[in-house]
Amino acid sequence: MIVLNPNNTTHEFKIIPRVYDLYNVTLELYNEETGIISNEVLTKTLINGFLECSFDKEVSNNSSFRIKIYNNSNDTVYYRGKIFFTNKTDLQNFRITNDYMTI
């Protein structure tokens, strides 16, 4: 799970993609509360096997999204996971139980 700060408008994270042939990349965010899917412009750089990504989006605190990074021309999935936005700084005490995150 990727944990990001909702107070930022530009969000940055690193992942290890499934494949490194990264063309026509689309970032899809599925809001788990509302069920709305949005496609975001993804800025990406491949450095030492990690894909460093950034995108711009305004989100609320404690919101959760399913993330999919894929090739929009042939639907090859590069990465699939979850993003949780919180303004908490002590992330050591987070625990995930039955798809529910507690602090």
Image (cartoon, rainbow, N blue to C red):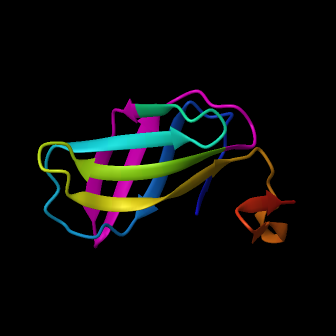
Residue 6 percent across, percent down from the top left: 67, 37
Q: Is residue 92 left or right of residue 10?
A: right
Q: Is residue 26 left or right of residue 28?
A: left
Residue located at (20% from left, 51% from top): 75
Residue 80 percent across, percent down from the top left: 41, 60
Look at the image and give the residue range highlighted in magenta: 39-63
User: Which quarter of the image is occupied by the N terminus?
Assistant: bottom right
Instruction: Report the number of numbered marks.
Output: 0
- The image shows residue 102, relative to residue 59, as above or below, that is below
- The image shows residue 101, relative to residue 27, as above or below, that is below
- The image shows residue 86, relative to residue 19, as above or below, that is above
- The image shows residue 16, relative to residue 9, as above or below, that is below
Residue 12 percent across, percent down from the top left: 48, 47
User: Which quarter of the image is occupied by the C terminus?
Assistant: bottom right
Residue 54, quarter of picture? top left
Residue located at (48% from left, 54% from top): 13
The one nearer the camera, 56 or 47, is 56
- Residue 56 part of the magenta segment: yes
The one nearer the camera, 27 or 32, is 32
Q: Is residue 15 left or right of residue 2?
A: left
Residue 38 percent across, percent down from the top left: 43, 31
Residue 47, quarter of picture? bottom left
The one nearer the camera, 61 or 11, is 61
Q: Is the magenta stretch mostly helix, strand or loop?
A: strand
Residue located at (77% from left, 60% from top): 101
Residue located at (58% from left, 27% from top): 58
- Residue 61 part of the magenta segment: yes
